Image (spheres, rainbow, N blue to C red):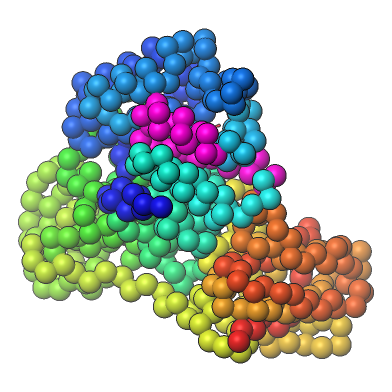
Amino acid sequence: IMNMSQKLALTPPMGWNSWNAFEQKIDEKIIKEIADALVRSGMRDAGYRYLVLDDGWLQKERDSKGILVADPVKFPSGMKAIGDYIHAKGLRFGIYEDRGKLTCQGLAGSYQHEATDMATFASWGVDYLKLDSCYAELNKRLSSDDYSLYRDEIAKTGRPMILSMSDFGNGAWAWGGEKIGQLWRTSYDIYPNMDSVYNCAETSTGGNVTHPAFNGLGQFAGPGHWNDPDMLQVGNLKTDTESRAHFSLWCILAAPLMAGNDLRKMPESVRAILTAKEVIAINQDPRGIQGYKVFKNNGQEVYNKPLADGTTAVLILNKSDKPAAITVPWELIGLMGRQKVRDLWLRKDIGTFEGSFTSPRLAQHEHVLLRIGSRGRPLPAPAPLPVERYTVTKSGVTYLSDLCYIWLSDLCYIWRRGNPPVSGLSARQEPLVLGENFYRKGLGCQGKSVMMYKINGRASRFQATVGLDPSNSPTAEGRFRVMEEDFFGNKMLFDSGKLRPDAPPKPIDIDVTNKGCIMLEFTGDNVLGTWAEARVVSK
Ligand code: GLA
């Protein structure tokens, strides 16, 4: 199979998607007007090339040959025609499907129609596929296998298509998303308010979805494969200040820029945000480094993104409701001495600064976005967390408490709310105790906790002793489960059933040969659970 995906999305994809503005209420007229508006507004020429029809374009039933059918009321001319219209405007055509039996809105899903659907899309001229995950847990396939199947079916059509993996942030970076598609969600759905915008951004900066040692998911992104904290709400937020903060965050995080507002009635101020040339250039920088946090204190944050030309982009943002001037010492961003500073929203050089830069007083959601330094040799990129810190690299025993978990149930993904495990101690920071024994190694959890470890096909056994901490109330109940990869795969390797604190500790010794990732799940309402000596053994 030809690997055509390699040349796609060398910089983060840019375009427009119908979901945030219209949800299911799209039709031929609206989509054509949006295509016109992409051109008229200057957005196409600013880089927004992909016009993507999200859920709601299709029918519940396939035709007698099993082919997907456009909703005949909304799209009477069919999908090939809308694709032709989009292409004639110098744009690219994107479409939504779901790898489950139904889409999230209950329309026809692609499960068991993968080859047919990819061929259909190719025949319609589709250039971009957003592939969602509702009902995918019924497929009984690992997400990595499921998405790989689509990648391969797309390749067989001979038509290059960007594959946007929409798995609501369940860890595509962990199981090798970069070899499968061009972008993957890092979060649950974004909504038009700043809490949601910041939560989604936080997933890409690592907060709550992976071990803090990673300092964000940046090391998993790069040309051709991007972390996707979801589509833009620019223009749907309350103020331009909010929209600008959202846009600058997505730009510094090298996130896909899929606009989600109604372009037909966009005020000039919103158009100006979405087409801000020097801001977009930060997002589209060919070096493709994802910006990372270099400072945070009570909602005051600084991000750094070293660029291809030797300068670096810096975002200084005040999320808190206390106005503040924020200082960036050059050593935080790999510089020293006197440095030139340019304000990218003002498009103005604002001077040369010695040792540091202090922003003006920033009210809540205000920020400055700067380009600092001079052209020349590129500044160093942040060092990735070394593989031995988060995967199995040696033979013999590797305790999971000595590894960084690669995924943790996302706090903004409400169904899977969880707490990070504690290494070597109970969640109350006390020694791990089960029955008569205490343990130096293991993971202590409290309440729901779901974490994934990357064992990289290197281990043959997973072993542990599990049980509830004796300090729990005698009626407390908890359950330990081990799954392969993420929960969509539904591949249960171990299930303790419900345990009480007085139950004898349960030993686990299971085969994990060739498994890429394992997911440890503890559930129990506020209960303390212990994975004592959780470890993998490799040859
Ligand atoms: C999911 C996705 C959204 C959108 C809707 C459509 O919730 O995460 O981005 O595509 O489905 O139903």
146 sits to left or right of 12: right
**In the depicted structure, whether residue 10 falls above or below residue 523:** above
Write the residue at 52% across / 12% down. Answer: 72
Magenta segment includes 120: yes
Q: Nearer the viewer, residue 399 or 291?
A: 399
Q: Nearer the viewer, residue 442 or 112?
A: 112
Q: Relative to 235, is 151 above or below?
A: below
Residue 437 falls left or right of residue 59:
right
Does residue 205 appear in the picture of this structure?
no
Name the residue at 42% across, 58% down: 179
Query: Can residue 533 be seen by looking at this rendering?
Result: yes
Residue 221 falls left or right of residue 342 = right
Residue 259 locus on image (x, y percent): 35, 33
Image location (x, y in percent) of residue 138: 70, 44
**Is residue 436 located in the magenta-colored stretch of the structure?**
no
Residue 424 against residue 172 in the figure, above or below:
below
Where are the magenta residues, as a range? 114-138
Q: Residue 187 location in percent, x, y?
A: 51, 49
Note whether 411 is above or below 500 in the view shown. above
How many labels sit on residues?
Answer: 0
Q: Residue 364 versus residue 345: which sits nearer the camera?
A: 345
Quarter holding residue 436: bottom right
Q: State the image quarter where residue 334 is shown.
A: bottom left
Question: Residue at the spot x=71%, y=74% of the render?
Answer: 511
> Which residue shows up at 34% across the image and 62% down it?
292
Where, quadrant-wise, is the C terminus in this rendering? bottom right
Residue 430: give x, y in percent of width and height. Answer: 71, 81
